[in-house]
Image: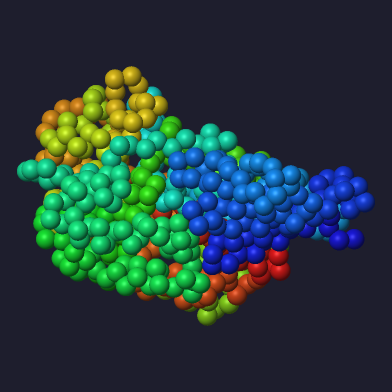
Amino acid sequence: MARARAATSLTACPEWVETVTMGPSPGQNRKSGGWPTTVHIMPHEEGGTGVTTSTNRPLFYSGMSARDPRGCSTSTPKKDRVHHVSAGDLLPTPRPSRSNAMAPPHDAVVIGAGPNGLAAAITLALSGRSVLVLEAASEVGGGSRSAELTLPGFVHDTCSAIHPLAVASPFFRELPLADHGLEWVHPPVAVAHPFEEGAGAVLEGSVEDTARLLGRDGDGYRRLLEPVTSRWRELSPILLGPPRIPSRILPPIRFALRGIRSARSIAEGFFQERNARGLFAGLAAHSTLPLERTASAGVALLLGAAGHVDGWPMPRGGAQRLADALAGTLRSLGGEIELNQKVVAFRDLPAASAYLFDLTPRQVLRIAGGELPGRYRRRLERFRYGPGVFKIDWALDAPIPWKDPTCRRAGTVHLGGDFDDVARAEHAVWQGEHPERPFVLLAQQSLFDDTRAPPRKHSAWAYCHVPHRSTWDMTSRIEEQVERYAPGFRDLILARHTFNTREFEAHNPNYVGGDIAGGTQDLSQIVGRPILSWVPYATPNPKIYLCSSSTPPGGGVHGMAGYHAARAVIRRQGG
């Protein structure tokens, strides 16, 4: 007897269109009215999402916005055939109990409960599949976790802190994460880039808002960012997906022609003054590439545009809240999560039709290398990891005393000086050196989220790039850099917690050598991630898939690698 479960199919296309066919709910059959329902999810011109169904009454679901992902409005082809629905109404009905004792207990097993692993599991559960997630740690989240690292009452984000790509993620935007406790906090200024003397630069509000503050570089800033922000809802699913040929090719080509360039060539080509060049350098340094390297400009364009459209927010209560909301969404769909389940060998995994690894190639080879052909294994072995990070969390007696008052309005502060200063620091890391004046990425969550520290106290989070597997203690150099822009900072430190690259990898094995991006994101590993393939998530073994940040679109908290990997499973299995 065939297994009794909801018959579901999901079909993606480049325009972010999904077709979901949901079968009868438990206890229903066609005679009792449990007819399958086909749901078509498609974009509206204004950036929302439309949903129609092929059952007796069409549904129209639209109005998804960056600030309120649950907002709804309706299209009205026929008034008497339309009703309002929420995201929860689109979720599949619970699966009937299985009638075939020989069937695997789960359709899919996901190894790793980071944002990508959870996104993959949710996508599979939405298709009607039964999913089990195995996580080695005692909590979900991977790179999106929080803990009291310094003193009681101080909540620190253990890795990711500010989430421009999470709030911009086409997949996360469609999930009812607010129903599971997620609340985004948007600082007034997304990014501040101060200088030791004079006013700094800021990424604030719209492109026009920022351009007005950049003086004679305002026109160059508009020419560079407006083509991306004006097409953001069209571009973001492409930029946050695997390589493919989109139906409308000109906007992504225009982005690629600029993004493929080095950050230095863009900065020198569009800007003349210190502030605009410094702001762009700080954005580009998130790539962890030398700023003279090809494709280092792409990350700056992506993060800059995301900041203008959706901001650089933080989850209220800590990054753990995002992971918990994803886990809550999965459980509401019938998915299962087992913690403290370290997977050592493929033979230890429970039976399933598909296995999705939210791990980097090195761990996949260690666990499942014997299940993969030699040629593919050798290709994974050539995957490269980049520089690591040294991270500090502080418990503070008061807010950071910035010389530039604009920094007090920013959730993220980039500390590194002008373009050449930032470029010099990032280049040194690639030469195996530890810069005297590192480029420091700092977040000050407690200024905007009072759950992060006890009353009248504050916290801060910062890191700098260091060579791969470095054990060098960068505490004094990072704190000296903060002190340059905020004299008196050191006097406010109540306690600190640090991670070097080895400690970071021990905390999260996906951070190989301290690389928090899941592997180098240079041009060759943007196009071929982890290998050059039209479906980079699939392996030659039809049961094994990769869904980590070592697959497109790469690093960042957005869940899109997990989403696309799950889509690859669904397509390969025929719906």
Give the image quarter of residue 520. Answer: bottom left
Rendering coords of residue 192 (x, y %): 22, 44
Give the image quarter of residue 454. Answer: top left
Left or right of residue 22, residue 153 in this image: left
Task: Tell me which residue sits at (25%, 35%) in the image.
Answer: 409
Note whether residue 466 is visible. Answer: no
Task: Tell me which residue sits at (37%, 30%) in the image.
Answer: 449
- Of the 4 image quadrants, the one containing the C terminus is bottom right
Judged from this view, the residue extending furthest toward the top is 455
**Residue 512 or residue 522, whichever sits in front:** 522
Give the image quarter of residue 510. Answer: bottom left
So how many labels did they put on this image?
A: 0
Judged from this view, the residue extending furthest toward the right is 31
Residue 68 versus residue 353 in the image, above or below = above
Left or right of residue 259, residue 419 in this image: left
Task: Tell me which residue sits at (28%, 40%) in the image.
Answer: 189
Query: Coloured how?
Result: rainbow
Judged from this view, the residue extending furthest toward the bottom is 375
Task: Tell me which residue sits at (60%, 53%) in the image.
Answer: 50
**Residue 253 or residue 411, whichever sits in front:** 253
Note whether residue 68 is visible. Answer: yes
Rendering coords of residue 495 (x, y %): 27, 29
- Of the 4 image quadrants, the one containing the N terminus is bottom right
Rendering coords of residue 293 (x, y %): 25, 69
Left or right of residue 98, residue 205 in this image: left
**Residue 46 or residue 435, whichever sits in front:** 46
Rendering coords of residue 319 (x, y %): 43, 40
